[in-house]
Amino acid sequence: MPPPAGTVPAPPSRPPGGAHAGLNRVSTQALTSLAQAAAAAELGIRPAEVRADWSDDAGLLALRIVAPIAIPDLSDAGSPADPSVWGGSVWERCAVAKGRILDSVARLSGATLSRVDIRISGMRMERRPAVLSPLMGALHG
C-alpha cells in the first residue's frame, strides 16, 4: 500500500547492504594509550613508563616507542638468569616486540602502521620473566 499523498517515508534505520551510516574515528590519545599498553606488555614494564610518538610515513602511521625494558635481577650473581627464559637477549626481545606491537595496535585499533621503532631508555630489574606477563597474553589473544 503506497503512503498517503503529501507524506515522506522515513529513511531506513540502516543503509542498504548492512553498512552503518556515520563516521568512526580513533583519537591520537586513544592510539597512544593502546601503543603504550602493547609496548609495556612486550617489554615487561608499566604503560606509564612508555613514551609513544606518531609520525606520517608516506600516508601510513609510524610508531616510535621510547621505554625501559625488564631484565633479570642481576643480584642473583650465583645463578645467572637464562636469557632464553626471558625471551632472549634485549636485542632479540626488541626485534620480536616490534612485530608484536605493530600487530596488536593494528588489530585492536584498525589503524594501518608502517613500522614500529623502539629505543630502549633503561633497564628495570625483575625477578620474574617479563614474557610471562598476563597483559601480554591478553593482547595476543
Image (cartoon, rainbow, N blue to C red):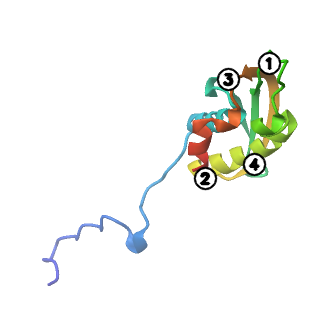
For residue 123, which quarter of the picture? top right
Mark identifier at residue 59: none
Q: Sequence order check: which comes first, mark 4 or mark 3?
A: 3
The residue at which mark 2 appears reads as 107
Q: CA distance from mark 4 to mark 3?
A: 20 Å
| Pointer 2 with pointer 1, Cβ within 8 A | no
Q: CA distance from mark 3 to mark 1?
A: 25 Å
Identify which residue, 93 or 16, lies in the foreground: 93
Q: Sequence order check: which comes first, mark 4 or mark 2?
A: 4
Label 2 is placed on what type of residue?
Answer: Arg
Mark identifier at residue 99: 4
At mark 3, the secondary structure is helix
Judged left or right of residue 84, residue 40 is left
The residue at which mark 1 appears reads as 76
Quadrant where the N terminus is found in the figure? bottom left
Mark identifier at residue 49: 3
Q: CA distance from mark 4 to mark 1?
A: 31 Å
Q: Sequence order check: which comes first, mark 2 or mark 1?
A: 1
Label 3 is placed on what type of residue?
Answer: Glu
Mark 4, other Cα within 10 Å: few <14 / some 14–19 / many ≥20: few
Identify which residue, 27 or 72, lies in the foreground: 72
Q: Sequence order check: which comes first, mark 4 or mark 1?
A: 1
Label 1 is placed on what type of residue?
Answer: Asp
Judged left or right of residue 20, residue 89 is right
Q: Residue at x 78, y 45 (%)?
A: 96
